[in-house]
Image (cartoon, helix red, strand yellow):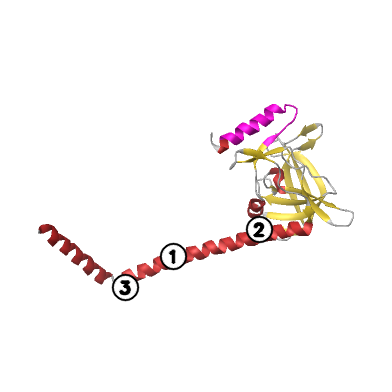
Amino acid sequence: MTPNNRALALAAALLLSAPATYASMAIAATFEQKVENAASIVLGKCVRQESRFDPSGRWIVTYSTFQIEKTLKGGPLPEVTVVTPGGAVGKIHQDTVGIPAFREGAENVIFTKDSKLGPTVLYFDQGAYDVITDDRGEKIVSPVLSNLVRVDTQRGMAIAPNDSPIPLPQFERQVNDAIRNQRDQKIRMETIAAERLRREASLWFVVKQNKWIIILALAGIAFATWRLVRH
């Protein structure tokens, strides 16, 4: 059984063993993957929300507008409106498993990605964090509560969230370290590619500058080989 099949079998077993619990599966994303693939990472306070049907008229989506307090990745903006599936319009209510439910007045760190309807949350609720202020006035960042089953495809098993509550300055350092490591890795790869191109260009230059000598040498080798075969 392949790792992916083991992951699906385990997730299915979890679902069948707990019929009263609604759950959904998602591939577990590392912190580095979230930072790399996020269009932006922002800390903000939810100041207003509105739920309405999407353009198809079949699904309800909720637009949560955040007043941005700090931008950890991406261009600075005064606010951002994040769209997520689910919500209530009149007496119709729709829920989506694995999608963070924001509330007005709360603070969150959000990893965003672009969608047809606007910015949304990257990697389902793996891309959202609650921010609370403790008794000492320090902001603490922790993963949002989730009933999403996260699957490690390398090991073929469901895993628990690996993020623990940490102070905001430490969270910021982790983001900055991930961005710096990715930038350094990109520079190293570009340097290696440039060096390879330089070597290839240098070899081709030598060949072009000495093409007649090379042609005569190859002709001499061919003639000598022919004489050897004749005898």
Q: Position of 185 compared to 65: left or right?
A: left
| Figure check: 86 above or below 167 | above
Question: What residue is at 84 percent from the left and 47 percent from the top?
Answer: 104
Q: Give, as a three-letter code, the residue at label 2.
A: Ala
Q: In this orientation, which residue lies closer to the viewer: 131 or 225? A: 225
Question: What residue is at 61 percent from the left and 62 percent from the top?
Answer: 183
The magenta-colored residue range is 5-24
Residue 144 percent coordinates (x, y)? 77, 45
* Residue 74 visible (yes or no): no
Q: Give, as a three-letter code, the residue at label 3.
A: Gln
Residue 193 percent coordinates (x, y)? 48, 63
The numbered mark at residue 209 is 3
Q: Which quarter of the rendering shows the C terminus?
A: bottom left
Identify residue for label 1. 197
- How many residues crowd around disc 3 within 10 Å: few (fewer than 14), some, or many (20 or more)? few
Name, please, the residue furthest toward the left: 231
Name, please, the residue furthest toward the right: 135
Looking at the image, tell me whether mark 3 or mark 1 is earlier in sequence order: 1
Q: In this orientation, which residue lies closer to the viewer: 180 or 81? A: 180
Q: Give, as a three-letter code, the residue at label 1.
A: Leu
Q: Residue 208 lies in magenta, yes or no?
A: no
- How many residues crowd around disc 1 within 10 Å: few (fewer than 14), some, or many (20 or more)? few
The numbered mark at residue 178 is 2
Q: Nearer the viewer, mark 3 or mark 2?
A: 2
Q: Total of numbered circles in the picture?
A: 3
Looking at the image, tell me whether mark 2 or mark 1 is earlier in sequence order: 2
